[in-house]
Image: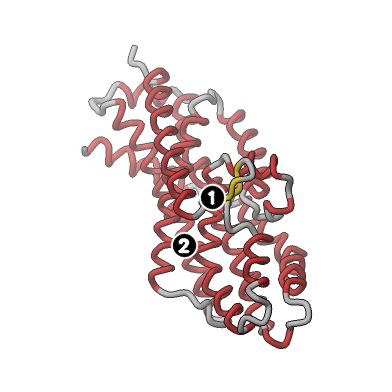
Amino acid sequence: MKGFIGLTKRNLLIYFKDIQAVIFSLLTSIIVLVLYLLFLKGTFVDAIESSVAGLENFILSDDIDTLANLILLVGIIGSALITVPYNCLSTVISDREKKIDYDICATPVKRWQIALSYFTAATLSAFIMASIILSVGLLVLSSTGSLYMGAIRVLVTYGLIFLGSVSATAFFMMVVLFFKTTSASGAFFGILSAASGFVIGAFIPLSEFSNSVQTACNLFPASHVTILFRNALLNGILDKMNDDLGGIDNGFFRSGIKESFTFNANIFEHSLSCNQMVAYIIAATILSVIGLIFIFAKTYKKK
């Protein structure tokens, strides 16, 4: 196990010591934040206020801002769980391009331990970065007002971060094994950074798209993970706002927000519950790991 631990530590250090790589791995999250500050917040706030038209006296403006800010936090975390593990896994491509993998395969470390070291390092890097974002985000937002979020719900959110880290790493490790050069990987990362914000609904809620586009986006486990984040982080403030209305709207506001900002994944016009989404993520992760084992075995044959 010393060899596995050593390789894992080495892969982690390669990622975290490269400050530029860390920053670029958060590129989509930074874009989401900048767009939010420029115009997305106004768009979100307008959408929320339109849902309570005529009932403004029952809803606090601070609660509307908190809800909009939590939507932003979800988008940032969801984006990070896509780009960070992929960027960390670029070490796999760099090692192959520089023939470092020949030296690694010549060591007594078994092939499955080599694969697991890449996998573990990418999972840990994604979990660490997303957890930092969540912690900082919750601290900043809680300083401006109550988030109506208990300790259990916060712990559940960290658990979802771990699940999302494992799922994304399993999927993207399969992807990176098909690249032979870092330039090709970098080009794909540019496409990934641009597309991921739309796939998880960080830029535009998925409810704004057609059913076929929603189905295509929700085939990716990352979309389900992000939706679960919305349920974990936003339900508390939504419940509070719903209580403030006192049933005067018959629950229309709460259901309208959940429909507008996508609290359930829709696949082939079928809405999945939170438990079904968790099951989908786990199943997709298992399939990715099986595919990863097969591809890695074929790629890293000893001569």
Q: Determine the residue located farthest toward the top in the rendered image.
A: 303
Position of residue 21 in the picture relative to residue 261 (left or right): left
Can the viewer see residue 16 in this picture? no
Position of residue 172 in the picture relative to residue 10 (left or right): right
Position of residue 84 in the picture relative to residue 47 (left or right): left
From the viewer's side, name the closer residue of 219 and 136. 219
Q: Which mark is residue 35?
A: none
Image coordinates for residue 40, horizontal then vertical, percent: 73, 63
Image height of 53 relative to 23, above or below: below
Image height of 133 relative to 277, above or below: below
Within 10 Å of disc 2 (Cα), the crowding (few <14, some 14-19, many 20+) is few
From the viewer's side, name the closer residue of 291 and 105. 291
Q: Amino acid at mark 1?
A: Leu
Q: Determine the residue located farthest toward the bottom in the rendered image.
A: 57
Image height of 131 relative to 219, above or below: below
Q: Which mark is residue 132?
A: 2
Q: What residue do we see at 54% from left, 50% from top? A: 272
Q: What residue do we see at 26% from left, 26% from top? A: 110
Can the viewer see residue 92 in this picture? yes
Q: Amino acid at mark 2?
A: Ile
Image height of 242 relative to 152, above or below: below
Within 10 Å of disc 1 (Cα), the crowding (few <14, some 14-19, many 20+) is some
Q: What residue do we see at 38% from left, 69% from top? A: 152
Q: Which residue is mark 1?
A: 272
| Circle nearer the N terminus (2, 1) | 2
